[in-house]
RNA sequence: GCGGCGGUGGCGGAACUGGUAUACGCGAUGGAUUCAAAAUCCAUUGCUCGCAAGGGCAUGUGGGUUCGAUUCCCACCCGCCGCACCA
């Protein structure tokens, strides 16, 4: 009997799949297109190709492939493409350090990724492969940019932006975490720069509403996105500064507390600050304060518990509800980029305003009595600031009314007076997409002194990224030094003009790649509407939670914008989302510095791709993380070897051509019952949130049962038929995880190709237990 | 502080709708095979008292509902993740 040599088996089947283009699927209108089957579009988030794939990749592609196989065998026409998110800073930083051009290094990594994915036996339709750094791809990234530009959804403006001094580029808000660059951890600075933005805020409401359309997105991802979009309802109320002749609108979620406003605060960056203090006694101290705030990092400023600071402006505004004059302050706890950059301060009913009032000895006024409805801690409820509900006091004609009712009445009254209206505010800001770096898609815009911002005409796309010598960032894009490339005639008037030298954030590239997969060879369009209408939306999207906000929000925005521009039929790109957990080692996140990394290639060569793949699916529920152990992989390898050995044994004894007889009794009957039990269990757990660990456990139980009875059954033709059926069943059920061994064993037992077989169905008659358990009360 | 997820043997984890807690795997112990080892196979393995038959205790803690609770309810403790001066 020969040993289980996984690499031999795996290479053999990989050759078959490659030669026969088994996983290649035609589009509508193409030869071989099959519309008799329902479609299923399975996408695993595309990798950033750097070095070699790590275990995270092994896990996510194993999970995705299991789903793809299961869908195929349940009668779906499945496409599972692959691509590379191949623009990005790491390749460029590497180029600065080593001199290896980003393109060369990236393409080497892509080859390595493709080779390993092939060795793992992932069932990819390679005819659809894309890489975002190729002109064939980014030509269409640029085209989409221009589409957004035409619709006013891409615009250029000067704004205070987050600048990472280490990476020497601006960052999107989403890419700044705790005041630090999400990539490199460097503290970011605020700079006032002209930058390109996508108008994500135009879709803020729709991004919230369309969560309705999503079928199985994990709650925590939706929650995170909702928090990020940060919708709050309230009112916009205008306070007037008579002495300076300026109206100050403020956003408040508590218009019911308007009568309690005792002062007024504006942000240090407020554009009208100069007008308010110019030539007054307050000018000196205010300027000093504003400068000191500017010197502070965002992180320091954002600290919730820090003592309140601020400076009086020596002016007042009029409270529109009672005509009262209240003093104005500038303070850094008011942020310019939320609401209107000014707030009415109600220290009696807001904790931050209260803290400020205490510090500056300002009056605190109660306008809501603690309600008696809650009945809990009366003492605490009586203290100020009080943020709960209750009847209004000291609020003119609204006294005695419950604050929730007063809310509506006050807003109605303000609207009548023309001093306010209902309003909704979002925390979400527009997406800053320009980067002062080299290795990205050039922004296809030409700056002309006379014509302004001129889009590069369609027939001149792509704007090819030129090859340069010096990648080092100098505060502006390295592209600025490429004179031949920068200087071009204006497409409109022909005068001398200059190209935009910024490149796009790589998240732009990855916001639409799942559309390019559908029509990757199309040189006339980004993708055909017909192909998109057939395949979209993605039926199952799979990836890490770390993209819960960034990538998933951007891709959702893209789909909505493309839909509104008539290029796409769906508003949500990913109908179902599955997020897989991270694999650790020795309980810690893997990192080169800790020396606890796992190189999948090593395990694939030692135990086979099937064992490595099955192990990552067996570690625990795939949405959770797990700790990698060598013993664990060995255990799975042992299980696969057992399946292999029993196959050899049955082959040696002679594989029966007959099916097991229906009347079989004893061990044969028990074994068949176990096989049907395993089919039933595996099918249910597969469908129930991809519980792969228990699917695999069920197959292990079946194999254990085969071993328990095989010596008794192998001598008898009928018993051998039962063994062959059960072994083929085990192969069939393990195939989504171990496609090579699944194919091998299945072929030996039946002569057929397992991936062409329908997923097995359990015979209900075989599921009935002989022993009926009666529950006695 | 707010929101979400979780806590079960020595370890990773099972347990569907409230019905045999600990499936499956790892590890450990004993045995078979072998000149020996590897590999393989078989058996045992929650803790505890007992020579044994058998008993007691166990799903983070404390209560509750129920004939019956890992599962449902209330209160609390711990861990992980996200957000956090957003008016």
Image (cartoon, rainbow, N blue to C red):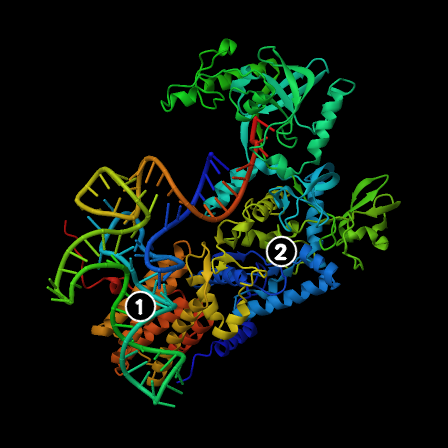
For the residues labelled 2 and 1, say whether their Cβ atoms are less than 8 Å apart.
no
Query: Residue A42 placed where, x, y %?
Result: 51, 57
Query: Residue A693 placed where, x, y %?
Result: 40, 61
Q: Is residue A381 visible?
A: yes
SS type, badge 1: helix
- Direction from residue B38 to residue A208 in the image, left or right: right
Residue in front for this viewpoint, A705 or A372:
A372
Are marks 2 and 1 in one subunit?
Answer: yes
Return the mark for residue A610.
none
Residue A239 picture quarter? top right
Q: Residue at x 52, y 39 (%)?
A: A226
Q: Chain of mark 1?
A: A
- Direction from residue A90 to residue A387 in the image, left or right: left
Q: Nearer the viewer, mark 2 or mark 1?
A: 1
Query: Residue A271 placed where, x, y %?
Result: 72, 27
Q: Residue furthest right?
A: A495
Query: Residue A401 placed where, x, y %?
Result: 45, 14
N-term mark: 2 or 1:
2
- Which quadrant does the N terminus of chain A fall into? bottom left
Return the mark for residue A675.
1
Separation of marks 2 and 1 at Cα, in angstroms = 43 Å
Q: Is residue A572 above or below residue A283?
A: below
Residue A342 picture quarter? top right
Q: Residue furthest top?
A: A397
To which residue does mark 2 refer? A516
């Amino acid at each position: 009997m020969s040993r289980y040599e996984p690499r031999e088996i795996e290479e053999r089947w990989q050759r078959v799949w490659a030669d026969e283009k088994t996983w290649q699927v035609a589009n509508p209108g193409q030869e071989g297109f099959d519309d008799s089957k329902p479609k299923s579009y399975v996408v695993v988030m595309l990798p950033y190709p750097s070095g070699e794939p790590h275990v995270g990749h092994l896990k996510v592609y194993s999970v995705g492939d299991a789903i793809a196989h299961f869908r195929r065998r349940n009668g779906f026409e499945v496409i599972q493409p692959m691509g590379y998110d191949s623009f990005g800073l790491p390749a460029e930083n590497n180029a600065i350090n080593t001199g290896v051009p980003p393109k060369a290094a990236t393409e080497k990594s892509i080859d390595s990724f493709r080779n390993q994915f092939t060795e793992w036996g992932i069932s990819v339709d390679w005819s659809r492969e894309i890489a975002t750094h190729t002109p064939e791809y980014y030509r269409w990234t640029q085209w989409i940019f221009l589409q957004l530009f035409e619709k006013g959804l891409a615009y250029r403006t000067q704004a205070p932006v987050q600048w990472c001094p280490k990476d020497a580029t601006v960052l999107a808000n989403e890419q700044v975490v705790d005041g630090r660059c999400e990539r490199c951890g460097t503290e970011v600075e605020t700079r006032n720069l002209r930058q390109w933005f996508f108008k994500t805020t135009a879709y803020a409401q729709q991004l919230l509403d369309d969560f309705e359309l999503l079928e199985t997105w994990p709650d925590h991802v939706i929650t995170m996105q909702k928090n990020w979009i940060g919708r709050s309802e309230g009112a916009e109320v205008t306070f007037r500064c008579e002495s300076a002749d300026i109206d100050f609108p403020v956003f408040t979620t508590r218009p019911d507390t308007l009568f309690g406003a005792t002062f007024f605060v504006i942000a240090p960056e407020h554009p009208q600050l100069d007008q308010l203090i110019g030539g007054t006694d307050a000018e000196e101290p205010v300027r000093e304060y504003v400068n000191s705030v500017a010197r502070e990092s965002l992180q320091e400023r954002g600290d919730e518990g820090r003592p309140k600071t601020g400076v009086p402006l020596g002016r007042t505004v009029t409270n529109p509800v009672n005509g009262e004059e209240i003093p104005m302050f500038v303070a850094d706890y008011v942020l310019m980029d939320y609401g209107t950059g000014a707030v009415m301060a109600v220290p009696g009913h807001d904790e931050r305003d209260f803290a400020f009032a205490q510090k500056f000895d300002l009056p605190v006024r109660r306008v809501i009595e603690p309600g008696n409805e809650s009945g809990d801690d009366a003492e605490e409820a009586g203290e100020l600031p009080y943020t709960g509900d209750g009847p209004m006091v000291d609020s003119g004609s609204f006294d005695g009314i419950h604050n929730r009712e007063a809310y509506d009445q006050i807003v109605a009254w303000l609207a009548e007076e023309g001093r306010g209206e209902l309003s909704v505010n979002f925390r979400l800001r527009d997406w800053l997409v320009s980067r002062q770096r080299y290795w990205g898609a050039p922004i296809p815009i030409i700056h002309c002194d006379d014509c302004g911002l001129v889009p590069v005409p369609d027939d001149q796309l792509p704007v090819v990224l030129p090859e340069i010598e010096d990648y080092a960032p100098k505060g502006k894009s390295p592209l600025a030094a490429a004179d031949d490339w920068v200087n071009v005639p204006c497409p409109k008037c022909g005068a001398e003009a200059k190209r935009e030298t910024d490149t796009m954030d790589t998240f732009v590239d990855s916001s639409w790649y799942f559309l390019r997969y559908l029509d990757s060879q199309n040189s006339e369009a980004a993708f055909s509407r017909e192909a998109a209408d057939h395949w979209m939306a993605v039926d199952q999207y799979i990836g890490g939670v770390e993209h819960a906000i960034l990538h998933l929000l951007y891709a959702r925005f893209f789909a909505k914008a493309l839909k509104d521009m008539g290029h796409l039929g769906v508003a949500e790109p990913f109908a179902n989302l599955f997020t897989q957990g991270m694999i650790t080692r020795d309980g810690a996140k893997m990192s080169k510095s800790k020396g606890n990394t796992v190189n999948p290639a090593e395990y694939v060569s030692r135990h086979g791709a099937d064992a490595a793949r099955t192990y990552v699916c067996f570690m625990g529920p795939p949405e959770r993380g797990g700790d990698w152990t060598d013993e664990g992989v060995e255990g799975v390898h042992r299980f696969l070897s057992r399946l292999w050995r029993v196959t050899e044994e049955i082959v040696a004894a002679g594989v029966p051509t007959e099916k097991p007889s229906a009347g079989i009794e004893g061990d044969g009957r028990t074994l068949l019952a176990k096989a049907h039990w395993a089919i039933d269990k595996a099918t249910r757990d597969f469908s129930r949130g991809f519980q792969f660990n228990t699917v695999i456990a069920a197959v292990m139980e079946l194999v254990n049962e085969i071993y328990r009875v095989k010596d008794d059954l192998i001598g008898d033709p009928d018993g051998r038929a039962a063994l062959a059926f059960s072994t083929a069943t085990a192969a069939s059920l393990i195939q989504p995880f171990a496609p090579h061994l699944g194919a091998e064993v299945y072929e030996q037992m039946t002569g057929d190709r397992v991936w062409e077989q329908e997923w097995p169905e359990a015979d209900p008659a075989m599921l009935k237990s002989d022993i009926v358990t009666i529950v006695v009360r």
